[in-house]
Image (cartoon, rainbow, N blue to C red):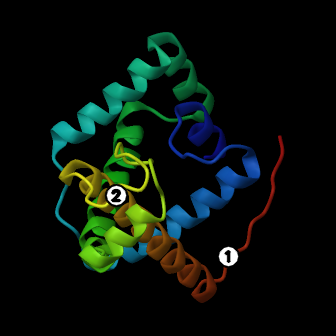
Amino acid sequence: DVRAAIDLGLVTASGEPAVLEALVNRALVLAEVARYAPPEPDAADIDERLAGIEARLGTDAFAAALRRSGLDRQRLRALLRQDALVESYLTQRFSVTAMPTDEQVGTYYRDRPGEFGGAAGTASPSEAALAAARERLTAERRARLVDEWIADLRRRAQVTVRSVRP
């Protein structure tokens, strides 16, 4: 699983220990997601994700990665479907709670002069600059909420990692 995740770029972590942790977290999240059954992802989205991996790796490297990992296209599609379910669940669960107020966005913007395309110290930022600040602040808050949620899932679970080397 670790080799497949690395070879196919299924996780953003790097290095086997970090990838293993990401896969453990993924399993815990999937168990939680299964309890709430988010809407089934669109088949075209899964096709697009699969095509994106193949295009990124190239056809030969993609086929080699599947062979090394013991996966076939159908199993990879199932993994990508699970990823889409998780994304849908996380969006549904954490988007509203991560939404900052206008005042919080303004403070965030002022605390980061020049990062959003406006001139440093500008008293009245453009709508585009405020939208960019809102988007980034929302993403940061959502990531923090998801990280806290996953940490709570890990605290409630009994996780045993066994290392098996060939």
Q: Is residue 71 above or below residue 19?
A: above
Kindly indicate the quadrant of the structure image that contains residue 45: top left
Q: Secondary structure at mark 2?
A: helix
Residue at the far top in the pictured view: 60
Q: Is residue 22 above or below residue 80?
A: below
Residue found 30% across the figure and 75% down from its top: 100
User: Can residue 104 be seen at all in this image of the molecule?
Assistant: yes
In the rendered view, does 149 fall on the left or right side of 88?
Answer: right
Kindly indicate the quadrant of the structure image that contains residue 64: top right
User: Can residue 30 be seen at all in this image of the molecule?
Assistant: no
Name the spot of residue 36 as percent of width and height, x first. Answer: 27, 78
Q: Which mark is residue 159?
A: 1
Q: Is residue 9 above or below residue 157?
A: above
Residue at the far bottom in the pictured view: 156
Residue found 18% across the figure and 58% down from its top: 40
Residue 9 versus residue 1: which sits nearer the camera?
9
Q: Which mark is residue 65?
A: none
Q: Is residue 8 above or below residue 21?
A: above
Q: Which mark is residue 133?
A: 2
| Dot 1 amino acid type | Val
Residue 43 versus residue 17: which sits nearer the camera?
17
Residue found 59% across the figure and 31% down from its top: 7
In the rendered view, does 45 fall on the left or right side of 15?
Answer: left
Residue 154 versus residue 126: which sits nearer the camera?
126
Residue found 22% across the figure and 48% down from its top: 128
For the residues labelled 1 and 2, the Cα–Cα distance comes to: 38 Å
Disc count in the image?
2
The earlier-in-sequence mark between 1 and 2 is 2
Name the spot of residue 85 as percent of width and height, x first. Answer: 29, 59
Kindly indicate the quadrant of the structure image that contains residue 3: top right
| Dot 2 amino acid type | Ala
In the rendered view, does 103 fall on the left or right side of 5?
Answer: left
